[in-house]
Amino acid sequence: MADQAHNAQPSSVDGQTRRDFLLYATAGVGVIGTGLALWPFVHSMNPAADTLALSTTDVDISTIKPGQSVTVVWRGKPVFVRHRLPEEIATAEQAASADLRDPQKDADRIKKPEWLILVGVCTHLGCVPLGQKPADPRGEFGGWFCPCHGSHYDTSGRIRKGPAPKNLPVPPYQFTSDTTVRIG
Amino acid sequence: MSDFKSNNKVVNWIEERLPVFSMMQHSAIEYPTPRNLNYWWNFGSLAAVMLIIMILTGLFLAMNYSSHTSLAFDSVERIMRDVNYGWLLRYLHANGASMFFILVYIHIFRGLYYGSYKAPREILWFIGIAIYLAMMATGFMGYVLPWGQMSFWGATVITNLFSAFPVVGDFIVTLLWGGFSVDNPTLNRFFALHFLLPFIIVGLVVLHVWALHTVKSNNPLGIDMKGPQDSIPFHPYYTIKDLFGIGLFLMFYLAFVFWAPNFFGEPDNYIPANPMVTPPHIVPEWYYLPFYAILRAFTFDLPLLPAKLQGVLAMFSAILILFALPWLDTSKVRSAKFRPLYRQFFWLFLANALVLGYVGGKPAEGFLVTLGQMCTAYYFAHFLIILPILGKIEKAKPLPASISQPVVKAAALIAMIMVGLAGFGGEAQANSGEGPALKKPATAFSWEGVFGQYDKAALKRGWQVFHDVCSNCHAMKLVAYRNLADIGFTADEIKAFAAEKEVPAEPNDEGVVVNRPARASDRIVAPFANDKAAQAANGGALPPDLSLMAKARVAGPYYVYSLMLGYEDAAPEGHPIPEGKFFNHYFPGNAISMPAPIMDDIVSYTDGTKATKEQVATDIVTFLNWAAEPELDARKSMGVKVMVFLGVLTALMFALKRQIWKDLH
Ligand code: FES
C-alpha cells in the first residue's frame, strides 16, 4: 500500500491547509450532530408526560387519630402521614441541634405541628423504615427505625443514629381543606 | 498483518494480546479497494448504518412497549404522546424499515447488474440473501407489534401461508400461533423474535464483510484488480465517500420522518386490532408486494398440487432461486457494462419486479390477475431460461485490460431511483380510491405544508365543538385533559373541564368505590361506561373513538371534513337508505348511523367567530388532527433545524471528499 499512500497527500501546501480546515470543520460539526442526536434517546428514558402528571395524591386525614400513622402512595413511594401526640411534638421541638446530624428545626419540617408528613424512604439506601404500625419498633428516638442497617429517626423524622446521612425528606404538600391533604 | 506498530505503549500492550488495532488497520484503513467504485457501491455501508439506527431506536422503543394484546396498541400511542421524543423514535423506526429495504433492494440490484454474485463471490452472495431473508422476517414481525388492524390481519394471512403445506401445515401454523388463532401468545413470541433477529443480522453482516474482504470488492468494470495501481486504501477515500453518502441519505430518510411519517404506513393500522372484522383491503408492507403478487398468481388446482400450495411454493422459490443464480448465469463476464444483451434483460427484470409489486398492492381483480400471472412467469423465466441461454449466445464487448479511472456519475440516477422506489412504496400502500373526490376547505388547513403549524384559535374552537357536540356520543380515550395545555388552555380552565366529569376513585377504607371528579391527569372521560352501553344508546351502532380518527382513514382530515358536510336531507333517487340511517355522500356505502352532527350555529364560539357549518367543520377537523398528531408542531420545527444542520454537514463532507479525491482524478 505504501506506494499509494502518497496519493492521499495533497499536492501543495495550500491544499494541505484547505484540507485540514475541511477535515476539522467536518469532524467538529459531525461530532456535535451525533451528540445532539443522542439526546432524544437519553431523554426518552426520563419520566414520560403521563408519569409526571400522576404526581399528586389526595389524603383524607379525618380518620387518622392522634398517635396513628398511615402510609399513602405518592409517585410510587410510601409517604408517612403521622398524627403526632403533644409529647411527640414536644420532644421533636426540644432536640438540640448539636445532637442532629442534619440539623433542622421541627418547625421547618411541618405546616401544622400535629401533622408530620414525610417520604418514607430511608436516606441511607432506600429501605422503608418501621414505625408506622403500633407494633413496630420505633427506634431509640420514638420515630422510625430502619431495619436494613439500623438507622434511627426521631419524631420529626430526623436522622439521629445509624448510617443514614439525611433526615427523611418532606414532600411538597398542602392542606386543601381541614380534612384533606394534597401531596405533590 | 503483524506489521502494525504504534508509539503508544498501551496500544502495543493491547495489540499483543488482542490484535484489534492491526485488524482495524487492515480491514478498515488499508483495505485495498478498487479505485473506480461508483456511488452504487455506497449502499452496503448505508444499509449497515440503517441497521444500527434500527437497533438503537428499537432498543429504546422496547423500553416503553408492552407486548400484551390488551396493552400493545395503547403502549405504542403512549410512546407517541407521552414518552419524551417517543414520536421521533417510533417514526425513525417505522420509516427506517422502509428505508432499510430501499437501500437493500438497490444493493441487491447493483449486485445483479455488475455480476457481484459470480465466482469467487458466491458465498458473499449467499450471506447477503440470508440477511435479506432475516430482514423480511424481522420486518414482518415488527409490523405486528403495534397491534392495529393491519398488524393483526397481516399476521393472520402470513402465518396461514404455512397451512398450505400438506401434513405438517396445520402443525406449523398452530406452533407459530401458540393457540387457535393469532393472539396474545403470538404477539409475545413475535416481540421476542423481533428483538432477537436484528442481532442475528448483525452476525450475518460480520460474515458478509469478512467474505467481502477475503474476495475483495467487485467494481463497475467487473474485472479483477491486477495490482496496486488498481486499488486505493479504503481510508480516507471511501470513508469520506461513504460519509458523504450517509449525509445525503439521512436527508432523504428524515424528510419522511419529519414531514410524511405515515407515508409508508396504512391508516388501518391506527385502528386497534379486531379479530372479528377484517379491513376491506389488506396488503402487506410494500417491500413484500412482488412476492405477494407471485403468491396470488396461482389460481388453478393441479392434481396433488392445489393452487394454494403452488402459490406458497412459488413465493418461497422466488427468493430461494437467488441462491442458484451464480450457476444459472452462465456468462463469465461480470459487469452488465460489457454484456449488451444482459443489460437489456436486467432492466426488463427490474421493470417486471416493479409491475409485480404494483399488482401485489391492488385487489386481485380482472386484468391485474392475468398481468400478475404473466409477470410471475417472466420472473422465473428470467432465471431459468433467459440467463442460462444468454451466457451461451451473448457476445460480450471486449473487457478493458485493467481498472481505469472513470467514476461514473451515478448520483442523479440514484436520487431518481430512491424517490421512485419511495413513491412506489407509498403508492402501492394507498387504498384504491373508491368513493367520490373529497371536499377541501376554501383555505388549506393551517398545519399543511412544510412549515404549517396548528392554528391555536381553531384548535380551541375545535375543542369547543368536540366538547359541546361530539363528546356526547364519541370517546377520545387517548387524550388526557392535561394535553389541552398544548392548545393554549390554562391550568384552571383544564381543571374545570376535567371536573365536569366523574371517574371511579380508588376503593375507600370500607372497600367501596365512589366516584371522584376527574383531574387534569385523567384521560378524557368517555360518554358511556363501555362499548355495549354506547351501542345501546346509539341504535346499535358504536360511535368510534375519535383519538386517532384523522390518521385512521385514508386522507383522514379531508375525509372527516367531507363527511361532516356530506349529508343529504333525503336519500337521492336510487339510493335507498335503511330505516334509522342517514345518507352521506362520503361514508362507505352511504348509509351512516350518525345524524348530521353539525349545522350553522350549532355552537356559539366564545371568541366571536361566526359558526358557519364550514367553519365548524374546519375547526373540528383541526382539533381531531391535533388529537391524532399532537406532536406535529414539534416534529416540523425540529425537522427544519435538522435539515439545515444536515445540509451544512453534507456540504462540508462533499467539499472534503472533493479535496481528498482531487489528486486521484
Ligand atoms: S437503608 Fe435504612 S439503614 Fe440502610
Image (cartoon, coloured by chain):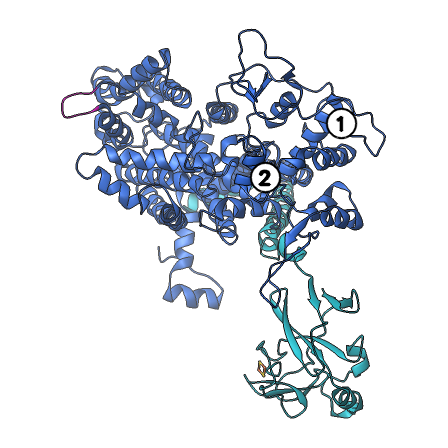
Chain colours: A cyan, B blue
Which amino acid is tagged 2?
Answer: Met
What x and y, as percent, mark residue A152?
A: 64, 88
Q: Is residue B18 magenta?
A: no
Are the numbered discs 2 and 1 placed on the same chain, yes or no?
yes
Which amino acid is tagged 1?
Answer: Ile
Front residue of B511/A30: it is B511
Label 1 residue SS: loop
Q: Main secondary structure of the magenta part?
A: loop
Q: Residues within 10 Å of mark 1 (few under 14, many from 20)?
A: some
Q: Is residue B628 left or right of residue B532?
A: right
Q: Which residue is mark 1?
A: B602
Which chain's residue wears label 1?
A: B
Q: Is mark 2 within 8 Å of ligand 1?
A: no
Q: Within the image, what quadrant is residue B386 found in?
A: top left
At a point 83% along the width and 28% down the height, the residue shown is B609
What x and y, as percent, mark residue B150?
A: 44, 34
Q: Which mark is residue B653?
A: 2
| Residues shaded magenta | B301-306
